[in-house]
Amino acid sequence: MSPSWPWRVLAALGTVASLAGAPWPAPPASAQAGVVSLALESQSPWNSPERPLEIVVRATNDSSERLEQLSIALTIRTPARSRSAYELSLRADATSSFFTYPFVREGALDPGESRTFGLQQPLELLTNRGESALYPLEIELRSHDAPVATLRSPMIFLIEPAKVPLSLAWTWIMAAPIDHGPDGVFLSEALESDLAPGGRLRAMAEALSNIEGVPATIAPSSALLDQLTSMADGYEVSPPGGELRTVAAGSSGAADATAVLGMLREVAGRPEIETVAYPFGDPSLPALFKAGLGKDFGPLLSRGRTLVREALGVSPTTTVIRPPLSHLDPGTLVRLVSSGARTVLLDQGLVPPPLDPTFSAPAVVRLSSGSEAVSAVVPDPGLPLVATAASADPRLAAHAALGWLAAMWFEFPGTPGRGAAVLFGEGSPYPAEFFEAFAPLVRSSPWLRPLAAEAFVDDIDPQGRAVMSPRSYPALDPSYVASVQRGKGQLRRFEDTLQEPDPVTERLRAHLFLAEGGTFVARPDLGTMFVDAVSATIRRIYSRVTIPSQTFTLTSRSGVIPVQVRNDTGHELRVRVRLVSDRRLEFVDGDTATILLPPEDRIVRFAVSARTTGLLPIKVQIQTLGGDPTPDTISEAQVLVRSTAYNRVALFVTIGAALFLLAWWGRRFLPRRRP
């Protein structure tokens, strides 16, 4: 008799909606792919004798034919005993068929139509086995007994409560590149999309909001927080090829920024949440140190932590650091230790894998460089692989990721001190819906023990050990670095010129710190806009210091010229006044004077001595005090000195010459001796 006869009987009866609890032999595999797509709508996170399996799938008819006599086969396969067997079970029949349960469904599936099918199956047969295990599931949709779509998902079955849960460090990194100019105008709509409902950052914030009471580590980047606070107050955006658009506070993108900022503030305020601050501007630390800007690391880190306190209302940890983009090399590691870091959060791949591939890579590695070392929390490389393989179905991807953690736990389920790390990094490949599905699965899994990073490091024993190997990362363009250095020097001289702190200097300093950010490794043109804005602002302020056109008259050889300087900046300035002339004019007491220039007119007097008469030009320069031998010129103008005084020596010489010429001319009137 054909093995498919039970299906024909059920289809003929037509009144049986579900035959749950009675296992059937698995139907033979059939190749008819691409007719219907199946997507996971929901599945119970784990099962037990008291928790039946519940699954809802959505079927979509992608063909041009009507599908009738529908039925579903739920196949439970024998346990996956290793991570490799589990990974294979998500795409093929890695283990043998254990039980198959048939479900008949009335109706049809028309072309282009979607339907949801809910299944509930008690698990007495698994209970009788008395084993906690990871069972691969196969959900097969059939039409006229022919399989038209298959979905594979894991089922975590616990026969008893977990005695030693698997510790889990999960880090949520929420980051965005700098996407605005120094005028605050956003250059694209990318961040708006990420913050809108359904966007990646919005989904991460909402997922965190819905797991109250569950420990975790969050690392909102300083570039993101800075842009969120700007957007929340209203902003302008000028996308490529589009028109400038103004968004008022409380509307569209500004409202989304406010919502995400509010969710992050609420999450960060929970006692079980560990918040990690990024250095301001999210710099690539190896690129920063290579460019000779390493002395800014301390101020950047301090400024980043201040931003977290101001934006989220919490003090971030000072012992856990996430190097932006996970860029780390031996020299950077030493500097992180010097800054107080005990733990670093890294991407996979920075730490050498274990020599024996049958064992999981250690989740915590004591990473050293020379005599310095930190504890590195390293995510498991297998989880993103199984999750991204199913990324077209985010809920299935979430269950696949959970199944991977279960596969790790089931390898040594009673071993204390074991753990796994998950990190959603800056370039996370997960779709937005993944976060909303994965977070509640972790919260609902009693065999997992979520922890913040620092507590996780203290919990894991034994830890791996590794030496930080040299690595190469993209660097800041040398010419760009030179422009940043020039801007920093110009700002220092500007600050020396101002006699009191001013908000404008803080804004300009922020521009230059931001210009050291990792975004500008690939986009130095955008960073140059910030550097140029600093120079333009300083020049604009300097332009309010002027030297009126003046002409002075010297009636004697020596005298004093009163140079008028006008200061309309509104600030008291400490400057150097310098006069430049040729040899016809001598400055008796020197050609420079250091003065305090109040926000009004000021007369600066110079003693001069003229060596000749006539109109003598003088260049008057107002300069900064710093920057020798080439200080910045604040203002420059030409004044004139008219010398009318006679020179006694010159007069004597002139009279003598005239008498000589007169005598010479008069010789013609003297009588000449005849020959």
Image: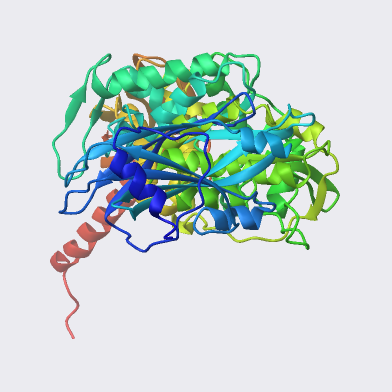
Residue 102: quarter of image? top left
Residue 163: quarter of image? top right
250 in relation to 192, above or below = above
Name, please, the residue furthest toward the bottom: 675
Residue 606 drawn at (x, y percent): 42, 28
What coloring was used for the rendering? Answer: rainbow
108 in relation to 46, above or below = below
From the image, which quarter does the N terminus lie in? bottom left
Residue 500 appears in the picture as rendered: no
Q: Is residue 134 left or right of residue 111?
A: right
Residue 185 drawn at (x, y percent): 27, 32
Residue 522 drawn at (x, y percent): 42, 53
Depth check: 482 or 77 in front?
A: 77
Residue at 68% across, 42% down: 133
Residue 103 appears in the picture as rendered: yes
Residue 188 drawn at (x, y percent): 27, 39
Depth check: 281 or 593 in front?
A: 281
